[in-house]
Image: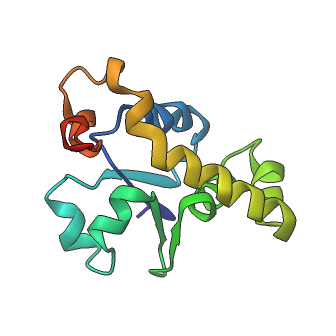
């Protein structure tokens, strides 16, 4: 069993790319990555609010503790060789505030930035309908 399971939005090209960039650093296979759209996700992790998890990446440790957003990234970093210092910095109060704001901004805009690389059109499902603007 993995030490940390990361639940991410597999419909988001930025999320998928981020996961693929992390995988090579997880040489000890301490992290499991699970697409929230996988039918097993809600069965395995009933404590996860799916709507929240689609907005903020979630990380669940082997004891069932859940971290979201920048905190999830910090806990991922704690398990990866070479990422420990950055992970600890993210957890330091002043840096944490900045990291949380940056994560929030990226998460809020991720579909907007990825429209052109989202070949299946799923990214546009998460954007406000431009025809509904006054």
Q: Nearer the viewer, residue 101 or 34?
A: 101
**Residue 122, relative to residue 4: is it above or below?**
above
Residue displayed at 31% across by 74% down? 49
Image location (x, y in percent) of residue 21: 54, 31
Q: How is the image coloured?
A: rainbow
Q: Look at the image and tell me in which quarter the C terminus lies.
A: top left
The number of callouts visible is 0
| Left or right: 134, with 24 as reference point | left
Q: What is the quadrant of residue 40 in the picture?
A: bottom left
Query: Vertically, is 111 above or below 108?
Result: above
Q: Is residue 16 visible?
A: no
Residue 18 at least partly seen = yes
Q: Residue at x 21, y 69 (%)?
A: 42
Residue at far left of view: 39
For the N terminus, the image quarter is bottom left
At x 36% / y 67%, what residue is drawn? 52
Q: Position of residue 44 (x, y in %)?
A: 25, 71
In the depicted structure, whether residue 57 falls above or below residue 11: below
Residue nearer the viewer, 122 or 3:
122
Does residue 106 lie above or below 63 as drawn? above
Residue 108 in percent (x, y) is at: 47, 49
Report the residue that reaches farthest toward the front.
134
Pick whichever, 117 or 81, lies toward us: 117
Which of the two residues, 31 or 113, is positioned nearer the viewer here? 113
Q: Is residue 118 left or right of residue 80?
A: left
Where residue 99 appears, as percent x and y from the top left, is 71, 55
């Amino acid at each position: 069993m993995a030490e940390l399971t990361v639940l991410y939005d597999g419909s988001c090209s930025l999320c998928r790319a981020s996961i693929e960039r992390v995988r090579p650093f997880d040489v000890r296979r301490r992290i499991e990555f699970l697409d929230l759209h996988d039918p097993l996700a809600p069965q395995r992790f009933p404590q996860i609010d799916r709507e929240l998890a689609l907005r903020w990446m979630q990380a669940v440790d082997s004891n069932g503790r859940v971290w979201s957003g920048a905190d999830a990234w910090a806990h991922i970093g704690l398990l990866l060789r070479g990422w420990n210092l950055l992970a600890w910095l993210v957890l330091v109060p002043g840096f944490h505030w900045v990291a949380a704001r940056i994560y929030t901004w990226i998460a809020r805009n991720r579909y907007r930035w990825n429209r052109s690389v989202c070949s299946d059109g799923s990214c546009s499902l998460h954007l406000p309908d431009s025809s509904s603007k006054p």
